[in-house]
Amino acid sequence: MFQRFSPCMRLVSILAVTFIISSIILGCGGGKEKLILGATTSVQDAGLLDEIVRAFEMHSDYDLIPVVGGSGQILEMARRGEFDVIMTHSPADEEQFIVDGEGLDPRQVMENYFVLVGPKDDPAGVVGVVSLAEALKRIASAEQTFISRGDNSGTHERELSIWQSLLIDPKGQNWYRESATGQGQNLLIANDDAAYTLVDTSTFVTFGSRVQLMPLVTDRVKPNAYTVIRINREKHQHVNVVGAIAFVEFITSAAGQCLIAEFGRSEYGKSLFVPVLGCPQAVGHLGLTSRR
Amino acid sequence: MSQPILAIRDVVVERAGRAILEIETLEILSGEVLAIVGPNGAGKSTLLLVLALLECPARGDVLFGGEPARRGDLKLRRRLAMVFQEPLLLDATVEANVRSGLALRGVHRAEQKRRAALWLERFAISHLAGRSARTLSGGEAQRTSLSRALVLEPDVLLLDEPFAALDQPTRATLIDDLDAILGQTGAATVLVTHDREEALRLGDRLGVLMGGRLRQIGDPSEIFAAPVDEDVAAFVGVETILSGRIRSQEGGLAAVSVGEHTVEAASDEPVGADVLVCLRPEDIVLAPRDEDDRPTSARNRLPGVVRRVLPSGPHARVELDAGFTVIALVTKQSLEELSLAPGSAVVASFKATAVHLIPHRRAAT
Amino acid sequence: MELIWEGVTEALHLIFSGDAYVYEVTLTSLTVSGSATAIALVIGLGIASLLAFRPPPGRTLALSAFNAGMALPPVAVGLIVAVLLWRTGPLGQLHLLYTPAAIVVAQAVIATPVVTALSTAALQSLPSRLRLQIMALGASRLQATWLLFREARLSLLAAAMAGFGAAISEVGATIMVGGNIKGSTRTLTSAIVLEGQQGDFETAMAFSIILLALIFVVILTFTIVQQRRPQS
């Protein structure tokens, strides 16, 4: 019967069938309750976010929808009530967020460290320096190229707070460039320019062989902490409170924490993120035992 | 009296606030071919579109079998078919094109094919059935377009200058063929053309459309002999047109019996053919009746009586009664010298070569 | 250069090993862009036939709008659609954000002006009295429209291909309204972006090659249909 159709009719019928089938496919998958998580890009770039989503959906009846952006963007959208729960790593902004009554019940769930990386020949003479502040000071006075995230992310925030403490304003100086990209891209740009930049340890490990930059100063004193915050229902009525609580409980439970601990172990030989509450079976996280 | 199959009543068509067509009454009689002539922009195409129920008049009705037709009524539209100056064929084979109208009406495919084959045969294009419409010559394409319309067996066939874009030899053959076919099918036809010859050849009645109004309608001979006003006269060209039949034919010289008289014409038309005899007024020489009968090269001499004299610039039109109306054009000087006045007895002579014959299947009176 | 070659081999490996992830994002791309193109065709052809055959006053203005729409920046469309579909936005109650349906909407918005502008031009280039002739053979308005579409099929199919191309190659709006979620709204294009961000360039290249191959196959099919000469 299909043969009787002219070629045009056949195309039309294929289109129609495609449309109908896709509507069915797209329409399905409903039924599960939705929970919207706003997460920072570094979690996705490392690949951990997909794992968390998969594990949580297996553990619960929720359809976890991860939305990714820089910490600044996530917090801004959270203020509009677009999320049920968020995971960010920007302490000052997060504090303001809580003070403004937007978020409740903040829990630190994992952390990694900031590391200053730079070219092998180290023109600013940063090697051997102990603190990030001292390193940035040397870079500034040597006027060596520094690539900043420039996107209001947690990393950017940390970087800016250091400049502030040094009373140096690098903006506009010709050695200071803002890439406005995520962790990985930023690192690649710095690599291309043989420049200095601030990056977190997870990203640096993941990108490992692709970049020729050396880790110069790791700040183990003030880790890069990732915090999960529930959005306040009183401010935004659409918030799925029960779901948010379920997520927080999962990510802070042994199951969630061990998931974090395991992540990256087989590929890189160590955890990319340190679970703050610890995983009972895990050992040897980035050279330190888990904190409690 | 034939029943008018299609009629117009008090129709006005407006465009940009102006009336471009105003017709009080027009009837298409079943079985007739009505030729509509007129200058460009006269509204001929618009008239056809109104008849086809494709153009909605601002006022007035189109009557189908006496009943007013509803706007764009599909059932009534399907009893009509129209052919345009451009063939406007679909991008498909000739056969598919001819079947297209039937397909629109939901006719069974087998029946479509059967009827199409018949009409392809009649228009002598069966050998083109499988060809793509894009590869046809002008004449072949127009034959396809005509087949496509006639296969629908319409109650009224509307033709909008169908031969205008064709070259002369192609036109001549196609007109011959269409003439024969129209004779066989007996479908009522409205033919719009700016070519008088076509109008005379194919039309039973002639209508003159000028400036959106129907100035004159009726027998072609009457219109050419007696145009109703100057505009019509200027457009159609005054002429004597008579109906006759070929009585004998001798090597290019035909004897045509017209009424009681015989007219000799230089023509190849066969014996027994019905023809229209056309004479231009300037070809007719008038002489007083009682001059002696010396032979001249004019083979035709018709005695007659002057009925009317109408001045026309430096000339005058003289209307004669020779048993039928003959119109001659003479100079004012001749008028005076011959003392031509109503009642004068004259002989109208003209050469056989000045007689123009147009075959017309229904010319028989 | 080796990266491209590595990408090709990786692509072949992914396809033939039946990697579920690859098939999943490919299927998502196809269904989402296919649906968006279908919607764009329905709306676009409808508007085109209106503008071409029963031109309303102000037709030129409307046509200019669609022509300009061909140059709509997809990422701007994405932002506008996202803002409309936000939970707190005017259409938030539809709960469409971060679902494949939202991507279909955004891609349809992007593809429709393309289809409309090109289809209108296609229909307007038909002989001006063809529609009259078809009606004069006894076609209803619907039959006439269908026949005219068939007459213009060469150009209309090109318009469809252009619309599909616009939809399937789109990434900015896709990520903004879809969220790039594994298993539901991750398309080939957004997967390429993600793999790139994660530094996994071989996979990103492989996906790019798969996407190119997919587009080629679809367009090839359309072109074959388009170029067929009429039979009986």
Image (tube, grey):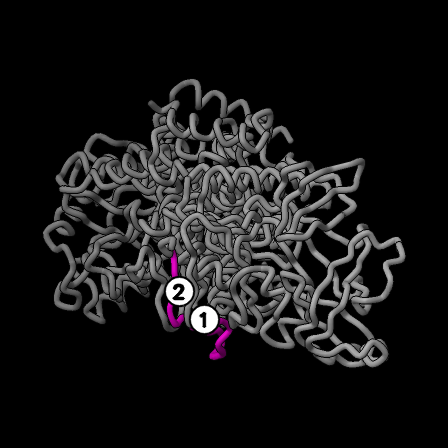
Label 2–label 1 contact, CB within 8 A: yes
Residue range highlighted in magenta: B5-21
* SS for dot 2: strand
**Above/below status of A1 relative to B29:** above
**Tag 2 subunit:** B
Amino acid marked by disc 2: Ile
Density class for disc 1 (Cα within 10 Å; few <14, some 14-19, many ≥20) is some
Check chain identity for marks 2 and 1: say if they share one: yes
Pointer 1 residue:
B23
What's the mark number on residue B361? none
Whole-percent x, y for residue A128 in the image: 54, 48
Q: Going from the N terminus, do you reach mark 2 or mark 1 first? A: 2
Residue B45 in magenta stretch? no
Image: A120 above or below A145? above
Q: CA distance from mark 2 to mark 1?
A: 7 Å
Residue B358 pos. (x, y %): 67, 48
Which amino acid, mark 1? Answer: Ile
Residue C124 visible in the current orientation: no
Which residue corresponds to mark 2? B8
Q: Is residue C146 visible?
A: yes
Residue placed at 71% from the left, 38% from the top? B248
Residue A78 rendering spot, x and y as whole percentages = 26, 62
Whole-percent x and y of residue C117? 50, 56
Q: Chain of mark 1?
A: B
Under tag 1, what secondary structure?
strand
